[in-house]
């Protein structure tokens, strides 16, 4: 492996489909990015029960030493609150133990990287409570999707009402609300293939490689997940505080 390209260990636990990956280089047509190995498991088993084992397996099967790893990437969200906390805690622990830099990548940014083509991209995750996490993207000159707006949480109906051009949707919310969007948007609606709807650590790693080359690392002490909205526990605490 070329020492000129960053080797990144990436972890995604933003959804039920957890994954770990080793990537070399960065995203973009000219960045030499490649996926060395990737392991995904779509299961209801708690991430904390399988994450470290998956990392050990990946490192052993690829013959990769911790010394060779140049950065540790984690999905910062949005996504499952519990999954994000587990992923962040795990990668922080690894960063402290190894001294490797910590890199945080949005789950939606990684989903958008799965979509080629010229259409506007809408990355969407099911936020429950009849809402979705969403963000729009356009490809830059290097073929990397860049945000064309903020990451938000809103109803699928509100999202459809904002769209006035052809869009390709990617993310697990398509399974829940794809037919609603198809009816609302007609020929403007397109869906990425089903395997691309799940967040994957390989996309995280390639985006993190770009961040590492630009020295866009997270502060280990201050790094927290991007929840976008308050958790049920926080909402309940707020209600209790107001009543008290």
Image (cartoon, helix red, strand yellow):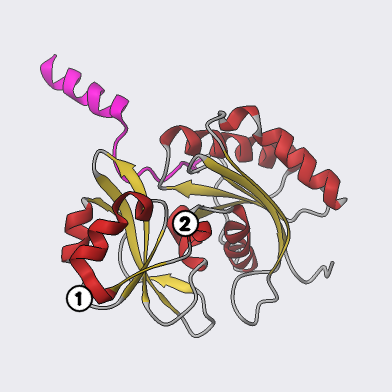
Secondary structure type for disc 1: loop
Quadrant assignment for the N terminus: bottom right
Disc 1: CA contacts within 10 A as few (<14), some (14-19) or many (>=20) = few
Residue located farthest toward the left when viewing the structure as drawn: 243
- Residue 148 located left or right of residue 198: left
Residue 230 on the magenta segment: yes
Task: Tell me if residue 65 can be seen.
Answer: no
Residue at position x 49%, y 41% in the image: 222
Secondary structure type for disc 2: helix
Closest to the observer, 174 or 47: 174
- Mark 1 to mark 2 CA distance (whole Å): 23 Å
Residue 109 on the magenta segment: no
Task: Tell me if residue 54 can be seen.
Answer: yes
Quadrant assignment for the C terminus: top left
Residue 219, percent from left and from top: 55, 47
Please identify the quarter of the rendering in which residue 209 is found.
bottom right
Residue 198, percent from left and from top: 50, 52
Residue at position x 29%, y 50% in the image: 132
Say which residue label 2 marks: 197
Say which residue label 1 marks: 164
Q: Is residue 228 above or below residue 185?
A: above
**Stretch in magenta:** 222-244
Residue located farthest toward the bottom when viewing the structure as drawn: 141
Residue 53, percent from left and from top: 73, 34
- Residue 79 located left or right of residue 187: right
Residue located farthest toward the right when viewing the structure as drawn: 63
Residue 110, percent from left and from top: 50, 60
Residue at position x 25%, y 61% in the image: 181
Residue at position x 18%, y 20% in the image: 241
- Residue 94 located left or right of residue 163: right
Disc 2: CA contacts within 10 A as few (<14), some (14-19) or many (>=20) = many
């Amino acid at each position: 492996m070329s020492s000129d390209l960053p080797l990144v260990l990436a972890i995604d636990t933003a959804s039920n489909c957890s994954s770990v990956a080793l990537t070399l280089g960065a995203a973009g047509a000219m960045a030499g990015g490649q996926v060395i190995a990737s392991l995904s498991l779509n299961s209801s088993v708690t991430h904390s029960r399988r994450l470290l084992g998956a990392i050990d397996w990946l490192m052993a099967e690829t013959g990769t030493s911790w010394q060779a790893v140049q950065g540790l990437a984690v999905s910062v969200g949005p996504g499952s609150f519990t999954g994000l906390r587990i992923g962040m805690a795990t990668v922080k622990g690894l960063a402290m133990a190894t001294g490797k830099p910590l890199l945080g990548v949005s789950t939606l940014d990684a989903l958008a990287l799965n979509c080629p083509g010229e259409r506007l991209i809408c990355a969407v995750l099911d936020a429950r409570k009849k809402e979705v996490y969403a963000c729009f993207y356009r490809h830059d000159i290097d073929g990397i999707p860049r945000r064309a707006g903020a990451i938000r949480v809103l109803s699928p109906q509100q999202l459809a009402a904002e769209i006035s051009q052809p869009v390709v949707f990617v993310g697990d919310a398509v399974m829940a609300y794809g037919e609603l969007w198809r009816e609302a948007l007609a020929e403007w609606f397109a869906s990425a293939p089903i395997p691309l709807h799940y967040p994957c650590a390989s996309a995280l790693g390639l985006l993190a490689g770009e961040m590492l080359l630009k020295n866009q690392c997270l502060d280990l002490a201050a790094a927290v997940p991007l929840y976008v909205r308050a958790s049920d526990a926080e909402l309940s605490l707020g209600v209790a505080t107001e009543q008290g």
